Amino acid sequence: MRRLGATAAWLVPFTLLVTAIVAVPLRILDDRGLPRYRVLKAELREVEATNERLRREVRALQRDVEDLRHDPAAIERVARDELGLIRRDEIVFQFPQ
């Protein structure tokens, strides 16, 4: 009877170890395991890069807004470049292309 207890005490940890050795790699290599992790990590890098690009764009737009609020030359530049406006005393020359 004592021999059966010693065998069971050894058999349970051994069975758990073998199960872990077999099950862990199967779970890691499963579609929801390591491959999914790699896809998500690549997606995270893309999202972080997009976020950084958008942060830079927002900062540039904030600078433009500040310039337009406080710098008359910036307002004139936008009026000329984007709206095609000219001053009253200016003459516009158009050349055929």
Image (spheres, helix red, strand yellow):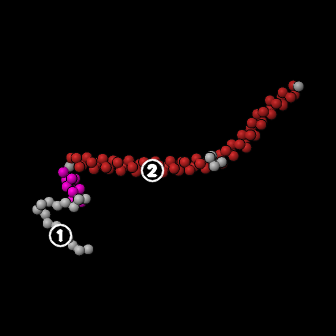
The nearer-to-camera label among 1 and 2 is 1
The quadrant holding residue 90 is bottom left
- The earlier-in-sequence mark between 1 and 2 is 2
Q: Residue at x 74, y 40 (%)?
A: 19
Q: Quadrant of the N terminus?
A: top right
The kind of residue tagged 2 is Ala
Q: Residue at x 50, y 47 (%)?
A: 44
Q: Position of residue 94 (x, y in %)?
A: 20, 70
Residue named by callout 1:
93
Q: Secondary structure at mark 2?
A: helix
Q: Secondary structure at mark 1?
A: loop
Classify residue 3 as left or right of residue 66: right
Classify residue 17 as left or right of residue 35: right
Residue named by callout 2:
49
Q: Position of residue 3 (x, y in %)?
A: 87, 28
Using a 10 Å C-alpha cutoff, classify the residue at mark 2 as few (fewer than 14 neighbours), some (14 to 19) or many (20 or more): few
Q: Residue at x 26, y 74 (%)?
A: 97
Using a 10 Å C-alpha cutoff, classify the residue at mark 1 as few (fewer than 14 neighbours), some (14 to 19) or many (20 or more): few
Q: Residue at x 77, y 37 (%)?
A: 15
* Secondary structure predominantly adopted by residues drawn in magenta: helix
The quadrant holding residue 4 is top right
Q: Position of residue 36 (x, y in %)?
A: 59, 48
Classify residue 41 as left or right of residue 9: left
Does 54 lie within the magenta span?
Answer: no
Range drawn in magenta:
72-81
Classify residue 35 as left or right of residue 94: right
